[in-house]
Amino acid sequence: MSDNLSVATMKAAISASVERGAFSLFPKLPLELRRMIWWASCCSNQPRLIYVSERVFDEWWQGLVASYQVPSQLQTNQESRECALRFYDFAFGSRMKGTSIYFNFEIDAIVFGGYQALYAFIGLWYNDDNELEAAETPLDKKIMAVAMLDTYWYCDLRATQAVEALGNPGYLQIITSVEPASARDRIMELVHRIDWLRRYPKGRNGYFGPAFGLSTIKQFQTMLQNILHNPKLAPKPKADTLLFDNQFSMSLFFGFHEIRRKLHYISSERFSMTRAPKVIALADQNVNEQNSIIRDAWNKFARDRDLAYKGPVAEEWVLEQLQEKLDLLFYQGLASKAAV
C-alpha cells in the first residue's frame, strides 16, 4: 500500500513540476543519475555564435568585447557546472585581454565584427616599418567554424596569415546583410564594392587560404546545425560557389557570386562595354577553367578594340567602365524618382 502511495505521490509531484516548469524531486535522485542527466543535457546543447567585436570609446580603441549566451548548465549549480566544464573551455583570455569565453570547440563558432577585431584577436599588427608582423602563438585547439561580417577583409594582404593563425578552420563564411529591397540599394551596394576594388588594387592580389562561402546569419546557423546532426547536409563550399578564386585577380572580382548575380540583373540594360555580359557568363564556368577563360576574354576584348591595355591595366579600365555604368544607373534612378 505504501508503495502505491509513493508512486501516486511521485506522479503528482511530476505533474506539478511540469506545470511549474521544474522537477522538485530532482535533488533526491541518486548522484549518478543526476550526473547522467546533466551529461545528457550538455550533449544536447546547440551550436552558439560568439560575436567578437572592437570596443571603441570616444574614438579610442579599448580592446575586444565578446557577446554570447552562457550555457545554462554553467550557471545552475555546482554539479551541472562540473559536468559542463568537460564540454566548455574557458578560452581566449589572453586574446581578449583577460576576458575569457566559455567555448565548445566541437560545436561553437566565432563571428568577427570586422577585420580589425580578427587581427586584434590573433595579435596580428603592422609594425612601425609597415611590414607584416608574425601573429602570436596559434590557437591550441582548432575552431570548427569562423564567420566574418566584413565583406572585403579577405582582400587584405594579411588575410591568409590570419586564417592560418586561427588554425585554418574547417568552415569559413562571409556573412551578408539582408537582401536590399530597392533597386537603388542594390546598385549603390555594387558601386561601393567596385569602388573599393578600384581604390585598393593590392586587395586584388589574391587570397591563398581555405575556401570561403557566402551566407546570412540564419543560413550560417542552419549550417552549424547540419554539421552537428548531419554533416552531409553541410558540405564545404564547392568550386563553383566560392566567394572568390585565389589565382587570378579578375576571377576574384567576377567570382564574387553575389556581385555576379546582381550584375546579371543590371546587365539587362546595355553596357558601355559590350563584352561585359559575356565575361560574366564565362565566369560562371568551372573555377579550374576560369582563370585562363577570363584572361583570354579580356585580352581578346583589348585586341578587338585596338587597345594597349593588358593585365592589371585592362582590369582597372574595366572597373572604371563598370563604375561609370553603375553611377549612371543610380543617378537615372534618382532622376526618375524625382520626376514622380
Image: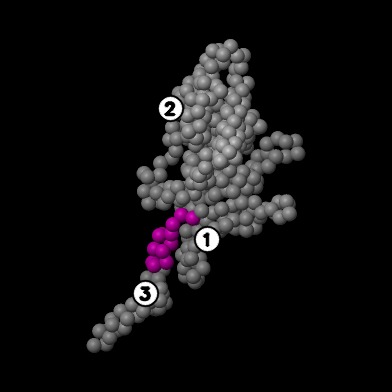
Residue at mark 2 to residue at mark 3: CA–CA distance: 56 Å
**Residue 11's x, y, as percent?**
30, 79
Q: Is residue 319 visible?
A: no
- Marks 1 and 2 in Cβ contact (< 8 Å): no
For mark 3, does the 10 Å Cα neighbourhood hold few (<14), some (14 to 19), or many (20 or more) residues? few
Residue at mark 1 to residue at mark 2: CA–CA distance: 41 Å
Q: Residue at x 48, y 25 (%)?
A: 277
| Residue 250 in magenta stretch | no
Q: Residue at x 49, y 41 (%)?
A: 214
**Residue 198's x, y, as percent?**
63, 30
What's the mark number on residue 69? 1
Q: Nearer the viewer, residue 33 or 23?
A: 23
User: Which callout, 1 or 3, points at the residue further toward the start of the chain?
Assistant: 3
**Residue 262's x, y, as percent?**
50, 35
Q: Residue furthest bottom?
A: 1
Amino acid bearing label 3? Val
Q: Which residue is mark 3?
A: 18
Q: Residue at x 37, y 45 (%)?
A: 233
Q: Nearer the viewer, residue 114 or 269?
A: 269
User: Which callout, 2 or 3, points at the residue further toward the start of the chain?
Assistant: 3
Point out the stretch of residues depicted in magenta: 36-48
Amino acid bearing label 1? Gln
Q: Which residue is mark 2?
A: 286
**How would you classify the magenta stretch by its main secondary structure?**
helix
Q: State the quadrant of the C terminus.
A: top right
Drawn side of residue 6 relative to residue 44, left or right: left
Amino acid bearing label 2? Asn
Residue at mark 1 to residue at mark 3: CA–CA distance: 25 Å
Q: Residue furthest right?
A: 128
Dividing the picture into quadrants, the one containing residue 165 is top right
